[in-house]
Amino acid sequence: MVIATVFLTIIGMTAGFVLGERHRDRLRAADPQDTTDIVTPYPADSSYASGPSGALCPDETIAFAAANGYPADLRQIFKAVTNNDTNVWICEDSNGQLYYQSQTKASSGVFDQTANALFLPRANRQGDNEYSAVASDGAKFLINSKQLRITFPDGRKPQVNSVESWE
């Protein structure tokens, strides 16, 4: 357990460092003559169009993405909380790729990709505020502002949970 904690801490620190360096490089590229005063080159009104502008996705998501070869510049499109204590985030990287992240038993405070969390690359926009993703076992996840619907590949009855909050 201690080793896992240390490992995740190192991954998080590395992801933070890489993001910081990338940000600093963008700032230098915006004004190559003067690097003493670093100011953000994009307006504060979120009109920066080359990437998502929402809040960062959870640290655990960013660390997992970085450790598995995905971009670590993940921004939250939304967060949904369901009636069965599940959190769902749809995240977007600077290239416009969407990612699905969920966490069951969220109130427990545990966020473990091998136990109660699921990261799925290649999520898809289905319409206004509706997104889908497919797990490697074929389970299909559909999230919108009203519900989370999980369809299982073995034909079991789909799991449907209502969304209680949408941020």
Image (spheres, rainbow, N blue to C red):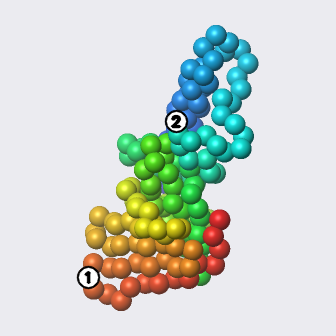
Q: Position of residue 134 (x, y in %)?
A: 34, 66
Q: Spatial distance from mark 1 to mark 2, Cα to Cα?
A: 39 Å
Q: Is residue 64 above or below residue 154?
A: above
Residue 16, by quadrant, is: top right
Q: Residue at x 39, y 55 (%)?
A: 121
Question: Which residue does the image show at 49% across and 77% down from the upper left?
Answer: 148
Residue 149: in sight, yes or no?
yes
Q: The residue under label 1 is which amino acid type?
A: Asp
Q: Looking at the picture, which amino acid does disc 2 mark?
A: Thr
Q: Which mark is residue 154?
A: 1
Q: Residues within 10 Å of mark 1 (few under 14, many from 20)?
A: few
Q: Position of residue 10 (x, y in %)?
A: 52, 39
User: What is the number of callouts on the image?
Assistant: 2
Neighbor class of circle 2 (other Cα within 10 Å; few <14, some 14-19, many 20+) is some
Mark linked to residue 14:
2
Q: Quadrant of residue 19?
A: top right
Q: x and y percent of residue 87 in the render?
A: 56, 69
Disc 1 element:
loop
Tell me if I can see residue 119 in this picture: no
Residue at horizontal 59 percent and vertical 69 percent from the top: 80
| Mark in front: 1 vs 2 | 1
| Residue lying at the far left of the rendered structure | 154
Residue at screen point 42% across, 50% down: 97
